[in-house]
Image (cartoon, helix red, strand yellow):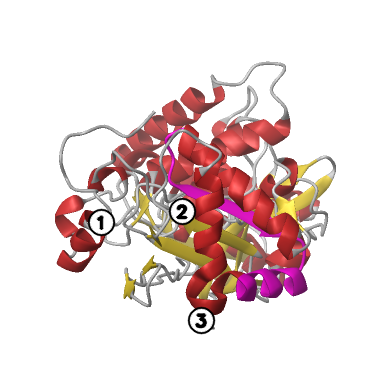
Amino acid sequence: MKKIISAFLALATAFTFAAGIPVSKAVPDIAVTAYAAESKSLEKQMLPYHYSKLSDTGKAVYLQLRKAALNHEKSFTYKKALDQDLVSLISDIIFYEDSLAFNVKGVSYVVYQGQNKTEFDLSYSFNQESADKMMKKMDAVAEKVISKFDEDTSTYNKILYIHDYIVGHTVYDESLNSAHSAYGSMIVGKSVCEGYARAFGYICSKAGIKTVNVVGRATADDGHTENHMWNRVYLKKQWYDIDLTWDDPVMPYVENKSYKYFLPGSATFANSHKPCNTSLTYPKATDDTSMNYYARKKLVAEDNSSAYSLLVSQIAKAAKSGHSVATIKLSDSTSFNSFKNYLEKNEYEKLFSLLSDANKKTSVKIVTDRFYGYIDDRNSLTVTVYFMMKNTTLSDYYTDVSSVSYEEIQFFKDAGITNSKSKKAA
């Protein structure tokens, strides 16, 4: 599910213009967990989180079923009549959670009490040759990412790097058969929420970081709710929620990566994300907010005055580094609502004042009478401003200039920004 984002152009006059509201999409599927691969047979590597919760019998059956799946076998027979609940759980784990069994399209089973056996039938998305090649490519990408780490790289920074890599290399697209797999995100660069979550789990597992994918429902700011999948990741002896899909919003802007759902703490995350009631029981996520990106970067404000000053400094800092977006987080819903109303009052009077104050703090000339995007996200308690700078072009703001509307082109042109070849101010 992609986050519905409201963004618009605004002038210091009464003029505003809708820049578009991206559509949300999602499909339910999968959960992934993982542990670093060792020198073991393939079916014993990268075992999913819920494998450890199985009984000894369940583990034995699971490894045999997993081996059959990795060998692309159409069926597997266990020579005992298993408990229905156990068989259902095993089937759910391999179908919904197992990152190595990404090629499994469906699992069905029959328990024959009289014949004392249990039969599993498996179907696949790709033939074995294709699936083997796909896994090799995913392993290569995972190793490429992990090669950036050394013995001094903290688990937090590993998680952050993997997050940024996946978000930076993936666009939300449900048109391909691989869109629901880690392959879609890691290799094709196009996937839906399952692809983002599975890719995160796949690379984390290779890096020795425990994760589990969570199947549930997510609700956007407009109240629209859809099936969704995200991750929980293990850090400092606690489980944290993280949603890469919602940190890669569907927007036409160059500056379209966020950290709103990067370890925000369960209390904030639960405003929009609810796990489904399935046979899979997920580890409880912590409400600790100290690992949240904005908390670590000291970008959390408690009142209007501190939020105003913080956003001024962030806009100035972003402009100096050639970026045109700044985000801060408010400490709670009360301070968030207060600051939102503070900025929007009298046709965004304070926001334009904020841009003027930021402009005084940098030699890069910020356009102070308009901004091209503004997002207040009550789920993540964040406020984001997309601002404009002199000596820039449309391609500094839009990923595809050819799709920009006439009204938007005119809006930027009135600010002195066209599609010429001049470079962004340093």
Identify the residue at horizontal 58%, vertical 59% (top origin): 230
Residue 222's label in the rendered image is: 3
Looking at the image, residue 371 lies above or below residue 12: above
Whether residue 61 appears in this view of the structure is no
Q: Residue furthest bottom?
A: 223
x and y percent of residue 378 in the render? 62, 71
Classify mark 2: residues with Cα within 10 Å, few (<14), some (14-19) or many (20+): many
Name the element at disc 3. loop
* Quadrant that contains the C terminus: top left
As rendered, which of 288 and 183 lies closer to the eye?
A: 288
93 sits to left or right of 190 = right
Identify the residue at horizontal 48%, vertical 67% (top origin): 3
Labels 1, 2: front one: 1
x and y percent of residue 414 in the render? 23, 58
Between the C-alphas of marks 1 and 2, the distance is 25 Å
- The amino acid marked with disc number 1 is Phe
Whether residue 13 appears in this view of the structure is yes
As rendered, which of 274 and 76 lies closer to the eye?
A: 274
Say if the magenta span includes residue 426.
Answer: no
Q: Which sits earlier in the primary sequence, circle 1 or circle 2?
A: 2
x and y percent of residue 66 in the render? 55, 47
Between the C-alphas of marks 3 and 1, the distance is 28 Å
Looking at the image, residue 387 lies above or below residue 236: below
Residue 412's label in the rendered image is: 1
Residue 399's label in the rendered image is: none
| Residue stretch rendered in magenta on the structure | 321-342
* Residue of label 2: 248
- The amino acid marked with disc number 2 is Asp
Name the element at disc 1. helix
